[in-house]
Amino acid sequence: MSFPIVRHRRLRQSTGMRNMVRETVLNVNDLIMPIFVTYGQGVKNEISSMPGIYHFSLDTLKAEVDEIVDLGIPAVLLFGIPETKDSVGTSGFVENGIVQEATRLIKKWYPHLLVVADTCLCEFTDHGHCGMVHTFEVDGQVHGDVMNDESLELLTKTAVSQAKAGADIIAPSNMMDGFVQAIRAGLDEAGFEHVPIMSYSVKYASAFYGPFREAADSAPQFGDRKTYQMDPANAREALREAETDVLEGADMLMVKPALAYMDVIRTLKDQFDLPLVAYNVSGEYSMVKAAAQQGWINEKAIVQEMLTGMKRAGADIIITYFAKDAAGWMQER
Ligand code: PBG
């Protein structure tokens, strides 16, 4: 008679047994909720490609932040939609910029809630690139080069102004070379040596950012981001990017997007000992929402499986537009 020598199903036979042997458990402390802030009064506008995610003006922000705090989520990531844009992204680093104002308010309401500031120029520049550009015309068509070293000064200014407003963590997402070193030096010089840098170390030139660019009004007006964001085909290059950031003084590393890059999350987890962040980006959110609205998938089960997968792959922290939903489901448990 042949029968299984080893019986895996013994440990799967009841909820209690499965709970006991579970390897990966999502915790509310792992979550960061992104928020889009904008000017105006009484604004709470749903982003059409991201159902359930809104633009908030400063006077409607409190209710959203109250909810986030009630759910026990420890951190928010701020994105700003400014009133005006120019070629150098001035509205990103002025003292009364939208992100700076929102940061001050949130820190006044909830001193213990961590404010993470996304440090980039693309939401604040009229050309929509993440750095300064040198433009030229060829046959009536505008082209541009994103200038690395010239951009570092602007990004550093942006980071320092965010720290001044009270941001607890600076999260540079611009993918210029040397950005961690430049921002670290700028923060230290301004007296913010205690403010950590969560570096978007491994950020791919991804189509999964599509809905975000509608939300943040940050699509590049010409060209694309492929000269600074990484080629989705490359994994070994991710090691070089991450290593550089570690050498330059990053306190946390990030992989972005998450779903199509689980292997990269695992590799970074094995190779580096800094806390690792996965960004579950806008397109990943919208795909699930769209399918759920059609009744084709079970949203709650799918989201829990995705976030657990990211953690199992090695993420310590997850930035996700599902943070409030996930935290709510944890409370139900
Ligand atoms: C800014 C930035 C982007 C995202 C976060 N910070 C857009 C981009 O690089 O085009 C994308 C986030 C998302 O898709 O949810 N550079």
Image: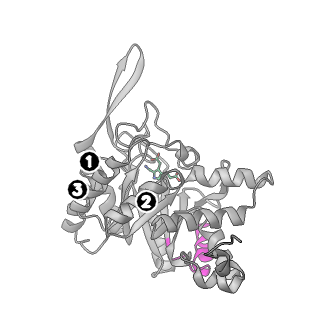
CA neighbours of label 1 inside 10 A, class few (<14), some (14 to 19), many (20+): some
What's drawn in magenta, residue-wise? 59-75
Q: Rounded to the nearest whole Å, what is the CA distance between mark 3 and mark 2?
A: 25 Å
Would you name the residue on which mark 3 appears? 182
- The residue type indicated by label 2 comes to Ile
Residue 128, position in %: x, y? 44, 40
Where residue 303 appears, as percent x and y from the top left, is: 65, 63
Residue wearing tag 1: 177
Foreground disc of the pair 3, 2: 2
| Furthest residue toward right | 295
Which circle's residue, 3 or 1, is located before the other in the chain? 1
Dot 1: what SS?
A: loop
> In the rendered structure, which disc, 1 or 2, sits on the residue that comes first in sequence?
1
Task: Specify the quadrant that holds the N terminus.
Answer: bottom right
From the image, state whether disc 1 or disc 2 is nearer to you. 2
N-terminal-most mark, 3 or 2? 3
Specify the quadrant that holds the C terminus.
Answer: bottom right
Mark 2 highlights which residue? Answer: 265
Image side of residue 19 versus residue 251, left or right: right
What amino acid is labelled 3 in the image? Ala
Q: Is residue 277 left or right of residue 157?
A: right
The amino acid at mark 1 is Asp
Residue ID at (79%, 51%): 294
Residue 322 seen from this side: yes
Secondary structure, mark 3, is: helix
Up-down: is 40 above or below 251?
Answer: above
Q: How many marks?
A: 3
